[in-house]
Amino acid sequence: MTTVPFPAATITGYPRIGRRRELKKALEAYWAGRSSRQELETAAADLQLATYRRLVELGLGAQDSSLPAAFPLYDQVLDTTTALGAVPSRFADLAGADGGLDLDASFVLARGDAGRPPLELTKWFDTNYHYLVPEIGPATPFRARPERLVADVRRAAEDGFAVRPVLVGPVSWLLLAKADDDAPAGFDPLQRLAELVPVYAELLRELAAAGAQWVQLEEPALVADQDVPGAALAEAVWDAYTALTAPAAGRPQLLVTTSYGSPGPLLHTLAGSGIEALHLDLVKGAVPSAEELALFRDEDAPVLVAGAVDGHNVWRADLAGRLAQLEELARAGVEVSVASSTSLFHVPHDVEEETQLDPVLRSWLSFADQKVAEIVTLSRGLAQGPDAVAGELEAAAEARGTRAEAPGVRDAAVRERADSLTDAEIGRAPAEVRRRAQEGRSFTASGPLPPLPTTTIGSFPQTPEVRSARARARAGQLDQAGYDRFLREEIERVVRLQEELGLDVLVHGEPERNDMVQYFAEHLDGFATTVHGWVQSYGSRCTRPSILWGDVSREGDGVRGEAFTVPWIGHAQSLTDRPVKGMLTGPVTILAWSFVRDDQPLGRTAEQVALALRDEVADLEAAGIGIIQVDEPALRELLPLRREDQPAYLDWSVRAFRVATSGVRDETQIHTHLCYSEFGEVVSAIDGLDADVTSIEAARSRMEVLTDLEAAGFSRGIGPGVWDIHSPRVPSQEEIEQLVERALGHVPADTLWINPDCGLKTRGYAETRASLEHLVAAARTAREQLAAPAGPPLQVQHGVQA
Ligand SMILES: Nc1nc2c(c(=O)[nH]1)N[C@@H](CNc1ccc(C(=O)N[C@@H](CCC(=O)N[C@@H](CCC(=O)N[C@@H](CCC(=O)O)C(=O)O)C(=O)O)C(=O)O)cc1)CN2
Ligand SMILES: [Zn+2]
């Protein structure tokens, strides 16, 4: 083993989509058959080189292993899966003669093919990034496939950079995996750790042979509470890392990272395991205690890689405060290196690109490139003393000072309103009372809704025409009146289509929205939006998170401001006798998918957003909209990773939803929509939202999720999705009928709604029309069977699987 020291300044990762989304464009061109594999590989290699050059320009070392080589084309967990040769059994036919997956095969795991759904996509810790879940069984092959990693290291070396390869570590990779469909009951992927570790050891040897002095193994799963008992987890960590660090010829030194929280007692295990460097997320509170610091002073103790600059939010760092904290660690006799708290891929590239932003606001912000500079400054300050970086410390303090004072950061009227909100104002009548009021209501010209009402989740396809009209409007090539006319016509088309299809509760289709959060941010005071601030959400898909910097209310005069969704939704309602469902994004989701101010508790910020939405809900109701949906797909995402922190979160998040939705009459029906399938942990919160109807994602799991809701005694309206909208596949009428029948095995017929899993914005019209035809037909069949006096009983007894 070589003993090159760990670099004094580093980052644990950097955005990989490209400053102008070069990778997104290259991938989508390749998938669409518009470019060759060689063109894709060249674009990816160019991006790596450009990244290294930029990072060195910003002050990181070219030769000291401070540059992470982490360039997944689709997802970093998928890349670790392929490097381990862990081909899931249902994709075994794609493996080459050597047992490995080439790039095209790995895209099939990511995107599926005609006969095969892709690997499941799931949230990456408490972020808006999604990873591909490895599927492991007792027989999944493990075989080192280091070729792509090695090629990256060699190519970097040819260009003059000595880089640090990155892999998801063995314990986290297994904890993030799920048992495959063939695995026997009780199988846990972690049971395969002993077989996996030698494969990691071989990957490490190959990387060292290619010239890597250091390798980074990411173990973020160690900061979240797991189902595995603590002692078993500690044993797994100990076994894996003592084995990987056992004296062996030609292994690289190991950095283990623990982003997104604190490893808790596992810090002891990791620090004593023989690894050469241990990264801690100081931003999320993983600050070592005096006793823990002692672990870093032992002989052979790891370097403490202090994640001192926030990789998950965009505020300029308090450099003086951070430097003082780092100096304290150093004074304790510990070798400290400075790093980001998480990979910087959660933030955009460069705030200097945002020339349209107010310069004062811009001076408060730090995107990836600014964060690298902050890390380099802190590292210099630590080595040479604060005086050496006095100018930088002062500039940071000054920017933070203007932030505290700036108009709009605190709006007295908004605060007074939030402070005077009473509990009576955020409760509705009991659900039963509302239900009776709503049942008696004529939602349609022909009377109440039929049983098993059909609806959709909100968005209709965002066609190239819709996106291009918006782009032309933004560029000034289409005037406001022309754009408005285009949108009104689009809404009319969508309404007529739904009438023709025979849906019961219509939507306006959301054509005016670029994104379900950004659109709201654009109409609320206290938010700013970016032009180039793209951040990867999954694969080639990106979002531009808005920046919530000040107190929030609707744009326009006074604390209530002006309605902004009513013109579109009201227009849709004016075109039809059927009820049009109003569509809003909920407070928690608006927070989760934005960069949020860090100068007050999240719950307080959520309450302000909720009050703005409450105003919009009231205006929709006043405009004659009788059904209003408030989407909270991110409710689960912000759930703290440690169980002890969860109740407080669920408290304020549920309260915010109720603030937004409780200002309406009993007759007004509130819907919500959640699209993830792990409900267990939040099922009581879903109950607490007190929505009249909740739609959820259920098609992929074939209604399995209903068992959680059933077990919790959920009794309100429920719309388990019967069409998985994540792929272009059209479900047949029979398939939907089966899902409806299954759902009726779990919930009473008079609470069941028939709808897709999620919005249709990523779908095309051909599959949308066909799938909705099948959905409506299946609902009709089910209704007929329910009504048939002598037919086979379709509504199976509660709790019995249909
Ligand atoms: N914020 C957010 N988070 C979310 C979701 C969500 O919908 N929103 N859904 C879940 C899954 N995540 C997703 C994230 C992104 C996309 C997605 O489709 N993103 C689009 C961009 C959507 C968008 O903002 N579009 C804008 C801007 C489009 C654009 O790129 N314009 C071009 C020009 C286009 C042209 O000339 O036609 C440009 O600016 O360069 C618009 O429609 O106006 C993409 O990456 O392709 C889907 C799901 C969870 N998290
Ligand atoms: Zn959804």
Image (cartoon, helix red, strand yellow):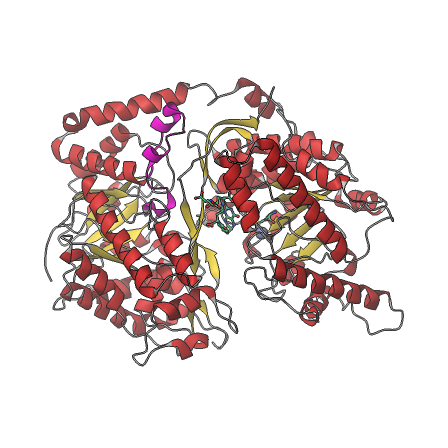
135 to 675, vertically: above or below: below
Q: How many marks?
A: 0
Where does the image place residue 738, in percent across and percent down from the top left? Answer: 69, 70
764 to 373, vertically: above or below: below
Q: Residue at x 63, y 40 (%)?
A: 487
Residue that protrudes farthest toward the front in the picture: 477
Location of the C terminus by quadrant is bottom right
Q: Residue at x 23, y 46 (%)?
A: 305
Q: Closest to the observer: 299 or 211?
A: 211
In this rendering, would 722 be left or right of 334? Answer: right
Residue that protrudes farthest toward the bottom in the picture: 97
Name the image quarter holding residue 667.
top right
Res 176 visible: no
Q: Residue at x 72, y 53 (%)?
A: 498
Res 194 visible: yes
In this rendering, would 62 be left or right of 101? Answer: left
Name the image quarter holding residue 203.
bottom left
Range shown magenta: 344-367
In this rendering, would 252 be left or right of 684? Answer: left
In this rendering, would 783 be left or right of 663? Answer: right
Q: Residue at x 58, y 24 (%)?
A: 419
Where does the image place residue 291, in percent across and percent down from the top left? Answer: 25, 44
